[in-house]
Image (tube, rainbow, N blue to C red):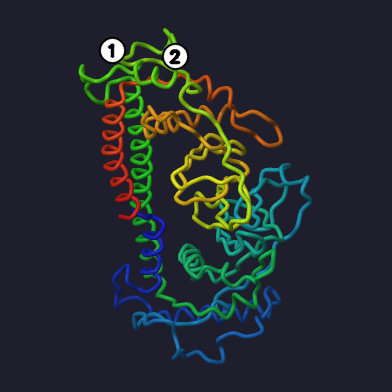
Amino acid sequence: MDTKKLRKKILDLAIRGKLVPQDPNDEPASVLLERIRAEKERLIKEGKIKRSKKTASDTPHYEDVPFEVPDVWVWTTLGEIISIKSGESIKVRENSIGQYPIYGGNGINGYYKDYNVEPNTITIGRVGFNCGSVHITVSKSWVTDNAFIVSCEDAFNIKFLKYLLIWLNLGNTSNSTAQPVISRKGIYPLQIPIPPLFEQRRIVNAIERWYSLTDILENEQNDLAITIQQTKTKILDLAFHGKLVPQNTNDEPAIELLKRTNPKFTPYDNVHYGNVPKGWILAEVGKICQLAEGELREDAELPYLDVKAMRTGQMIYKRSGKHVDAGTMLILVDGENSGEVFRTKTAGYQGSTMKVLQIDNNMNKGYVLLYIKMCKNTLKGNKVGSAIPHLNKKMLKEMIIPVPPLREQQRIVAKIEELFAVLDKIQISIETG
């Protein structure tokens, strides 16, 4: 289930007047709006706020509105009900020297010795990646010049206003520069529907109730996702200890298949790994896998198979490089995710951060790849190098892989794929709802 979309749908129903029923005894929103206008005029005359350059006062009746709302609601513009001003700057070195929260472009980012707003003040991120984010101060706080301070009538439910501002997605009004900025000019003309005050309160209670249920669903979803991953890990652990599928005494022992590659092959004796079933052996990964390079070729335009191409399918083309065939295994040897293995879907040129992973033909390649996948966190956590981390090739080579008979390898891979398919189906179902 996509809980983000669910929250968005709940909010959209609320702002359209479809989340809670209307009460005919509620004072119409038009009366509330007139009170807000009157109070705003008083504050303008007293010099406490400035008049916006253009409001809806000249055109109080809206005909061209985005959607229909209940009869007791009224359309207006944001500039009719709020006034905004920028916060005040402080020196960076002073952002951790006090008790009052500092609100910047995306909520609390430090503490200050002074405050410039009271509790329950709405702030809007004004500058940066998170411009348009909306917060309500939890206490006396300092709002920086990276955010707007919102003033509104006490007759307006502040939590409803917060949800209304979130629904407006104010970040979409920002400019298109490298440093996004939103302005009064972009905010004030936005059309908004206003419900009666008592309905605002009912809407807020309903939103919070639905959001609370959504949080529960999200937590359960996250718990289930963790459980699925843990289950996959356990399946792999059982598989590589010979406990996932039954053994067959008619299977050719593993020692025979590896001696076909190397007549002098001797199993690895590691008492710490634990017992493996009869017919299995322990071997170093380096005895059955090699890191290699593609064949140098020129004057043939082919895809460049780097990490981006392998993950997204977005490819660039080159005229020369280290050629690899479709179906080749490439292992990432440079970068944070060193140890990740990809199978090429097309012929092309090997990426510069990749090596060809050659697996002994006497082994089931899927079995070996599953083992390396199980060890990916170990490989990732033991990279070498400082500026650019690299795959610890020595560790990969010396890792011990339990090798069952070939036919059992095939049965193990088939069972893992069967079980993983079921778990993946469950994962998709909880993500899509």
Closer to the camera in the image, 17 or 309: 309
Q: Secondary structure at mark 1?
A: loop
Image quadrant of residue 20?
bottom left
> What residue is drawn where x is 59% and y is 78%?
188
Circle 1 residue:
278
Amino acid on which disc 1 is placed: Lys
In the visual, does 35 lie left or right of 275? right
Counting other residues with Cα less than 10 Å from the Cα at mark 1, is it few (<14), some (14-19), or many (20 or more)? some
> What residue is drawn where x is 40% and y is 65%?
11
Closer to the camera in the image, 405 or 98: 405
Circle 2 residue:
265
The x and y percentages for residue 389 are 64, 34
The x and y percentages for residue 347 are 49, 50
In the visual, does 309 lie left or right of 404? right
Quadrant position of the C terminus in the picture: bottom left
Q: Is residue 322 above or below residue 254?
A: below
The x and y percentages for residue 97 are 73, 42
Amino acid on which disc 2 is placed: Phe
Q: Secondary structure at mark 2?
A: loop
Q: How many marks?
A: 2
Query: Residue 404 has which mark?
Result: none
Closer to the camera in the image, 281 or 53: 281
Q: Is residue 114 above or below residue 18?
A: above
> What residue is drawn where x is 69% and y is 60%?
146
